[in-house]
Image (cartoon, helix red, strand yellow):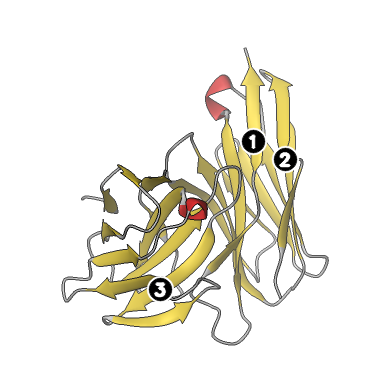
Amino acid sequence: KQEVTQIPAALSVPEGENLVLNCSFTDSAIYNLQWFRQDPGKGLTSLLLIQSSQREQTSGRLNASLDKSSGRSTLYIAASQPGDSATYLCAVRSRRGNQGGKLIFGQGTELSVKP
Amino acid sequence: DAGVTQSPTHLIKTRGQQVTLRCSPKSGHDTVSWYQQALGQGPQFIFQYYEEEERQRGNFPDRFSGHQFPNYSSELNVNALLLGDSALYLCASSFGSNQPQHFGDGTRLSIL
């Protein structure tokens, strides 16, 4: 059974700091891994999607890496800003059986960037 | 181009009641997935609808049921509500079951 874990559960950093969020998964049979942002009481906004054949994806100040063999992904945020404060979720899409339609999420990392 | 829209935004019910939540997919999308997100947790997959049929289902009891209409919109029904059903219910749409999903802002359901 695929399980997704995110560490840390919460993180507080001063503005301008570079930071790394971690995501691990137990089964390497995935189609892709996706990072989302969620503001309080809101839905999910997709940040980056990495296909299983890719090693990383970049968008602006965000860079996500994927090491499928070790079951790990990291989301790197450069020069953090207070507007980056939100919960960050990673999710995988499994290749096992008839599971490809659903996303399996971690519990999220709640990020607070202090001015 | 409207994204995924959900209604209502908030809902308060009491134990034992029934509730219906609604979702309109993003234009051009034909597949709708529903997720339950308890406070402080990641979303949990409930089920997915494509061509008006339930195609996949997560570990949720039969009290949770759904429907997809010919225009691809969808409903989530929950019967015999329990306190533990209090959560944010998220709808996601995609073009096909294995394509990236786009999420709505959710319906916040509170059970008293």
Quarter containing the C terminus of chain B: top left
On the rendered structure, is B17 left or right of A108?
A: left
- Give the structural element (helix, strand or loop) at label 1: strand
**CA–CA distance in space, label 2 to label 3:** 28 Å
Please give the name of the residue rendered at 37% of the width and 81% of the height, measured from the top-left corner.
Answer: B54
Q: Nearer the viewer, residue B1 or B8?
A: B8
Q: Which residue is mark 1?
A: A110
Tell me, yes or no, whether the two marked residues, 1 and 2, touch with CB atoms within 8 Å. Answer: yes
Q: Quadrant of residue B69?
A: bottom left
What numbered label is drawn on residue A64?
A: none
Residue A17 visible in the picture: no
The disc labelled 3 sits on which kind of residue? Answer: Gln
Residue at horizontal 59 percent and vertical 22 percent from the top? A81
> How many other residues sit within 10 Å of disc 3, few (<14), some (14-19) or many (≥20)?
many
The residue marked by circle 1 belongs to what chain? A
- The picture places residue A60, in percent across and down from the top left corner, at 55, 38
Q: Amino acid at mark 1?
A: Glu
Q: How many marks can you see?
A: 3
Q: Residue at x 22, y 71 (%)?
A: B72
- Residue at the farthest front position: B16
Tell which residue pokes out farthest to the top in this image: A115
In terms of secondary structure, where does tag 2 sit? Answer: loop
**What is the secondary structure assignment of the residue under circle 3?**
strand
* Dot 3: chain letter: B
Q: Which residue is mark 2?
A: A9
Amino acid carrying label 2: it is: Ala
Quickly name the residue at label 3.
B48
> In the rendered image of this protein, does residue A1 appear above or below residue B13?
below
